[in-house]
């Protein structure tokens, strides 16, 4: 059973007890990510995530790690465009310890100047590694091409120039602007007791004052092309269309469409482009969403000699899906989505994350039956209609990386889509 309590200062505490489990996952999700940064702050949310583990007023970096690992657990964090999460997985008896450590790193970081220099170097190495990983960097470039000169279009890691100058004051300012209790969700699943978690949360967070929600820059799709020619083994191709937001009625339709188009080995793109033509090893489609926008993305890697054929066939399959997507394909996609959701939620970590994410989006946690019903309600006709509308809106973005000299230009690709 999912239980939700909101403290007077706005901190939301959501838990789900899973009686068959001996372990639990617990964490704090802060509604502060890449799109909450000003231009000069780009990369600070991720830098702050790194610094949380580098020492607090009562624990050194080593003591933080030892506190969790001494009881056999693990602790980690991540930064996305709309949130930063700090979480741990421990045995049920150690949930209180895990929450104490997480609260400590979120509320009491010391931002030691020596540790800042160490993490500065680590993040610069991380940026370098990303630039050396084409199937990672291509999605950053695609995001930037879709939303140029906007917070939502910038990379989460930020530019090296920003990382090189961030200091203690910059980190402290971002915390003061965004790390209020009313911008946090405490989520836990597994061997947890809701009343105990709430009591401890009151002790750890109850003294904090709400800070109010800061407005973020609204997303405005302005699709462009980014083409980086480089002597690589493959061309990395990523094409995107503006998709529905989390608040849009088309959300589940777009997800079913993307799954049918390129969500598995039986999907249209995989069968036509890999299995029949052998033009690539990897090809897929996915639908991602944000609070006020979304993206339907197609990715593939192919040789420079075959990139033109791959682009043309991909466009043809996109157009064909709007005309002859079958009931069998849609039914298979619905089953894949429901099974994937249920299989993923066998983990307490996945359940804790889902509760935090949906609570942030909709202010509640939809039941699994409700989600399954909404997926099942997506018809073949709705998928065809969505596919047609997506193409007719002419809201596309393109990123290419590698020996892409033979790829069609962006204008030509758009004309072929519209023909």
Image (cartoon, rainbow, N blue to C red):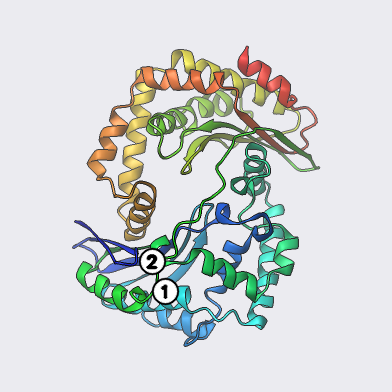
Residue 83 vs residue 287, the one in the foreground: 83
165 lies above or below 64: above
Q: How many labels does the image show?
A: 2
- Separation of marks 1 and 2 at Cα, in angstroms: 7 Å
N-terminal of the pair, mark 1 or mark 2, is: 2
On residue 27, the disc is 2
Please state if 279 lies on the left or on the right of 205 as rendered. right
Quadrant location, the C terminus: top right
> Looking at this view, is 134 or 7 the one in front?
7
Locate residue 416, reporting x and y percent: 66, 16
Q: In which quarter of the image is residue 26?
A: bottom left
For the point 37% across and 17% down, the residue is 381
Tell whether 249 sits left or right of 136. left
- Count residues near mark 1 (Cα–Cα under 10 Å), then give few for <14, some for 14-19, many for 20+: many
From this viewpoint, which residue is outermost toward the bottom?
58
Query: Within 10 Å of the Cα at label 2, are there few (<14), some (14-19), or many (20+) other Cα atoms?
Result: many
Seen in the picture, residue 306 relative to 72 is either above or below; the reply is above
Image quarter (top left, top right, bottom left or bottom right) of the N terminus: bottom left
Callouts 1 and 2 close, C-beta under 8 Å: yes
Q: Mark 1 points at which residue?
A: 102
Q: What element carries label 2?
A: strand
Instruction: Identify which residue is drawn at 29% across, 68% down.
Output: 23
């Amino acid at each position: 059973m999912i239980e939700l309590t909101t403290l007077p200062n706005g901190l939301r505490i959501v838990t789900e007890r899973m009686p068959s489990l001996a372990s639990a996952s617990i964490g704090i999700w802060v509604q502060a990510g890449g799109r909450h940064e000003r231009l000069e702050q780009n990369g600070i949310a991720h830098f702050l995530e790194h610094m949380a583990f580098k020492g607090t007023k009562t624990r050194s970096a080593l003591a933080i790690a030892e506190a969790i690992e001494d009881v056999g657990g693990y602790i980690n964090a991540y930064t996305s465009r709309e949130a930063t999460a700090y979480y741990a997985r421990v045995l049920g008896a150690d949930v209180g310890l895990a929450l104490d450590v997480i609260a400590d790193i979120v509320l009491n970081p010391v931002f030691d100047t020596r540790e800042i220099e160490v993490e500065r170097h680590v993040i610069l190495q991380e940026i370098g590694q990303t630039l050396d990983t084409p199937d990672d960097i291509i999605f950053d470039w695609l995001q930037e091409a879709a939303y140029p000169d906007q917070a939502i279009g910038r990379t989460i890691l930020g530019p090296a120039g920003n990382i090189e100058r961030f200091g203690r004051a910059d980190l402290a300012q971002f915390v003061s602007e965004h790390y209020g209790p009313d911008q946090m969700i405490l989520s836990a699943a597994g061997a947890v007791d809701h009343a105990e978690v709430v009591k401890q949360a009151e002790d750890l967070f109850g003294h904090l004052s709400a800070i109010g929600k800061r407005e973020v820059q609204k997303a405005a799709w302005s699709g462009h092309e980014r083409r980086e020619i480089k002597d690589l083994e493959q061309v990395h191709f990523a094409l995107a269309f503006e998709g529905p937001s989390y608040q849009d009625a088309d959300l589940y339709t777009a997800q079913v469409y993307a799954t049918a188009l390129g969500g598995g080995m039986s999907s249209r793109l995989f069968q036509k482009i890999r299995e029949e033509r052998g033009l690539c090893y990897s090809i897929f489609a996915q639908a991602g969403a944000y609070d006020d926008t979304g993206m339907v993305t197609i990715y593939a890697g192919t040789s420079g000699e075959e990139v033109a054929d791959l682009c043309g066939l991909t466009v043809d399959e996109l157009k064909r899906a709007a005309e002859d997507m079958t009931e069998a394909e849609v039914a298979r996609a619905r089953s894949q989505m429901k099974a994937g959701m249920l299989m993923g939620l066998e983990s307490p970590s996945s359940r804790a994350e889902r509760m935090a994410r949906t609570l942030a989006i909709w202010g509640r946690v939809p039941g699994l039956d409700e989600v399954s019903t909404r997926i099942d309600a997506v018809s073949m006709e709705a998928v065809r209609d969505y596919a047609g509308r997506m193409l007719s809106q002419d809201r596309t973005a393109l990123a290419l990386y590698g020996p892409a000299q033979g790829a069609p230009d962006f204008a030509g690709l758009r004309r072929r889509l519209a023909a």
